[in-house]
Image: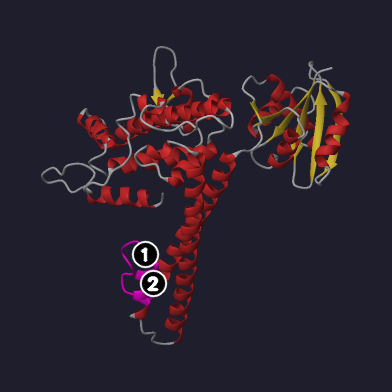
């Protein structure tokens, strides 16, 4: 009998419910989260040789259990929590919120869904994901410390520090401050502690970026050949793309990363709006690549942007067009890297390893020349300055976006 086993994972326990082809419950089990959790579940499910495991959030809370089941040779699919919630909402029977009902909803969602993602054993992409997230967390912590340091300096220095603060600049400012009274002395001491925190985070960021750069080089990816994509953005992209083979074309990939517009048509009215869906981390990496290209006059991405502006599009519209072109280029590079990896795997240990040269599929892509490797060139403003126009505010916003990458 073929069964679908839904698993509702938690930190302390996991609840599994097995259903048949007609969605009838044929068994349920709750196990404690321990070193034997996978063995207990597999032993319980041994009476159903034809089985598939559906783990809710196999990329999050259920990652460890899903990986243990995959390592044991089980077939596991990932079910997004929102799909299970919709099944529970539309269920005509018992809709009480408890672990067995949640696990059954996961199994029903996996049984009905046609787009379930099969969980594979973690590979080098997981290493990139780990260090990319570590870099993101450190960058956020540094921004928080810098903001707190700015706030304290505003109470010590008239006008505060107007530009982005660095550890060296903050140290020079503090050296020039003479505390007049115990309150000012306390504020200066607090600013010195924030400065020490800032230096520590800067050191951790630099070390994490080196580890991430080494992991990106080891992956052999050609993404770093795209203008504006460095080790950090490449780590985000590779770590957050579950597998380029699951996207049949570049349009599906653009929908996944949020650079494709969303159709909201009704009747004879055909309307497309900005998409706020998709993987936002991946969308952020593409956005920063687009901002970097716009800021350099020698990049072909800047020429594409200015062409859209000359055609009557606004800044945001032209930026979205550029992001979509970058998305298409990234898709082509990922497909080429996957093809090279497959050729290398088929060749065996003695085969010749594929490369990311100009003769590869990524190099022959029509977008390759437009978004090639960045080369040193003169820094310019966003676009040629027009008489009577001062685009300084926009330039400052673009600089702030670029620095956060």
Residue 202 in percent (x, y) is at 46, 62
Q: Residue at x 47, y 49 (%)?
A: 213
Q: Earlier in the sequence, mark 2 or mark 1?
A: 2
Q: Residue at x 23, y 51 (%)?
A: 392
Q: Nearer the viewer, residue 401 or 134?
A: 134
Residue 73 in percent (x, y) is at 76, 30
Above or below residue 165? Residue 2 is above
Q: How many marks?
A: 2
Residue 104 in percent (x, y) is at 77, 28
Q: Residue at x 44, y 83 (%)?
A: 185
The residue carrying mark 2 is 153
Residue 185 placement, left or right of 305: right
Q: Quadrant of the N terminus?
A: top right
Chain part drawn in magenta: 153-174
Instruction: Determine contact: label 2, label 1, CB under 8 Å.
Output: yes
Residue 250 in percent (x, y) is at 44, 24
The residue carrying mark 1 is 165
How many other residues sit within 10 Å of disc 1, few (<14), some (14-19) or many (≥20)? some
Specify the label residue 310 is tagged with. Answer: none
């Amino acid at each position: 009998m073929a069964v679908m086993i839904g698993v509702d994972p938690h930190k302390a326990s996991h609840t599994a419910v097995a259903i048949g082809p007609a969605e009838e419950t044929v068994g349920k089990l709750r196990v404690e989260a321990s070193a034997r959790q996978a063995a207990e579940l597999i032993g319980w499910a041994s009476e159903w040789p034809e089985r598939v495991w559906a783990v809710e959030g196999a990329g999050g809370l259920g990652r460890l259990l899903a990986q243990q089941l995959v390592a044991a040779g089980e077939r596991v699919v990932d079910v997004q929590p929102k799909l299970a919630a919709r099944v529970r909402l539309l269920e005509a029977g018992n809709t009480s919120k408890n672990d067995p009902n949640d696990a059954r909803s996961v199994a029903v969602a996996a049984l009905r869904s046609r787009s379930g993602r099969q969980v594979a054993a973690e590979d080098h992409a997981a290493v990139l994901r780990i260090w990319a997230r570590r870099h993101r967390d450190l960058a956020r912590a540094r921004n928080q410390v810098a903001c707190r340091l700015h706030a304290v300096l505003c109470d010590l220095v008239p006008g505060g520090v107007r530009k982005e603060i660095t550890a060296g600049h903050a140290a020079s400012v503090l050296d020039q401050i003479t505390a007049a009274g115990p309150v000012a002395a306390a504020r200066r001491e607090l600013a010195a502690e924030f400065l020490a925190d800032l230096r520590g985070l800067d050191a951790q960021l630099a070390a994490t970026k080196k580890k991430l750069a080494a992991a990106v080089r080891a992956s052999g990816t050609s993404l770093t050949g795209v203008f504006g994509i460095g080790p950090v953005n490449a780590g985000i992209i590779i770590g957050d793309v579950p597998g380029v083979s699951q996207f049949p074309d570049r349009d599906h990939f653009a929908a996944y990363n949020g650079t494709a517009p969303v159709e909201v048509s009704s009747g004879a009215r055909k309307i497309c709006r900005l998409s706020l869906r998709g993987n936002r981390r991946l969308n952020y990496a593409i956005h920063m690549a687009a901002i970097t290209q716009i800021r350099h006059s020698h990049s072909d991405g800047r020429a594409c942007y200015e062409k859209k502006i000359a055609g009557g599009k606004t800044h945001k519209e032209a930026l979205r067009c550029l992001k979509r072109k970058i998305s298409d280029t990234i898709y082509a590079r990922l497909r080429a890297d996957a093809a090279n990896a497959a050729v290398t795997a088929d060749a065996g240990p003695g085969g010749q390893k594929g490369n990311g040269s100009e003769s590869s599929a990524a190099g022959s892509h029509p977008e390759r020349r437009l978004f090639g490797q960045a080369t040193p060139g003169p820094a310019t403003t966003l676009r040629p300055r027009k008489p009577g126009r001062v685009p300084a505010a926009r330039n400052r916003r673009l600089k702030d976006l670029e620095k956060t990458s």
